[in-house]
Image (cartoon, rainbow, N blue to C red):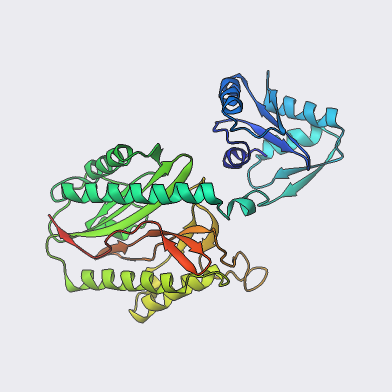
Amino acid sequence: MTHLPNIFYLSNLHSSSGVLVLTPKNGRLLVDFRYQEAVANLIGAKGFPPDIQVVEVPGSYEESLSSVISHAGWSRVGVEAEHMSLRFWQWLRKSITAEIVETEGLVENLRILKDAHEIALFREAGERIVSALALIRQQGFSSRSEVEISHEIERRLFEVGFDGTAFSTIVASGLNSALPHAQPTSRKVTDGDLVVLDFGGNYHGYSVDLTRTVAVGRLSSEQKRLHEAVCLAQEAALKTIHPGILASSVDKAARDVLRDFGLADAFGHSTGHGLGIEVHELPRVGRKRIQGGPTEGDITLEPGMVFTVEPGVYVPGIGGVRVEDDVLVTHDGFEMLTEAPRGLSVTK
């Protein structure tokens, strides 16, 4: 394994480099000198798996990995096809005699169901990001630039105890709000603006994600209609969540509401995405894919899954609206992790 989030999930080590080799009985973690002390600290704190041996990498990771495989005498070795570079794969193919087998999603499919420890982290992170939102609302938005507001958001995330941001903060005002992933600009918020605030925090290795759309001054009836449609779409999607249904059913519920508002074409992204060590992971909460069958890429919801529910509409010349919350699938439905006002509160 070369995908760092998967290495963290299985070893508890945060690093910018590393290779983890697993067999049915044990493992070998290849890391260079930069992480030797970090591993030693994990071992001392009993936070490192006892059946994983640490292998120091004195030179290149490729050479060390080749040596481990050759000495073990394995005849078949699986690699993470989605995360290994072509250069690494070609080098490995020339350097070992073992058959190389491409794998997909082996660890990601384990990560999709959160255990009690992970769920506790999500609950705490959810409370923290909601408290950050309350602080952000107190500052007001009028006459402040998008960049200034984004810096304020990120400062508040650290203030409430996050270790870092989960992604680049989105602040999109006025016509910029019609851009789903707009980057903050020097534009100053003015009267009559819709302002999309999309931000996330990383807490002890796990990410949460929250979006609210606020109004500054007086809005047009059409702007208000967009917000009403999105809130009703999210409400419909949330009502469908329970174990045993397909993730695409959650997406369909939101999409049906927006279609009834005549806004089907204004909703171009999926209704949600999984949360965990990465801010985008399984399950994908979107439309059914045709390739390979009607449920290609679809997932049946199970207790322990955590994902966002974030319908949005984006209309050039008018603006956009997105409302996003994080949920945990439970045995009888779902638990809201980010309970905060969703109404279009008019602010200064």
Q: Position of residue 227 (x, y in %)?
A: 27, 68
Q: Position of residue 239 (x, y in %)?
A: 42, 73
Q: Is residue 167 above or below residue 180?
A: above
Q: Is residue 7 above or below residue 253?
A: above
Residue shown at the point (74%, 37%) measured from the top left: 90
Q: Quadrant of residue 234?
A: bottom left
In the displayed orientation, state which residue is furthest to the bottom.
260
The answer to whether any part of residue 269 appears in the image is: no
Residue shown at the point (72%, 43%) measured from the top left: 79
The answer to whether any part of residue 225 appears in the image is: yes
Q: Position of residue 24 (x, y in %)?
A: 78, 43
Residue shown at the point (78%, 40%) measured from the top left: 25
Q: Quadrant of residue 282?
A: bottom right
Q: Is residue 279 above or below residue 306?
A: above
Residue shown at the point (26%, 45%) measured from the top left: 185
Q: Is residue 287 above or below residue 59?
A: below
Q: Position of residue 213 (x, y in %)?
A: 27, 59
Would you say 226 lies left or right of 99 here? left
Q: The N terminus lies in which quarter of the figure?
A: top right
Would you say 7 lies left or right of 62 here? left
Label count reads: 0
Residue nearest the observer in this picture, 343 or 115: 115
Would you say 86 lies left or right of 256 here? right
Q: Quadrant of residue 315?
A: bottom left
Q: The C terminus lies in which quarter of the figure?
A: bottom left
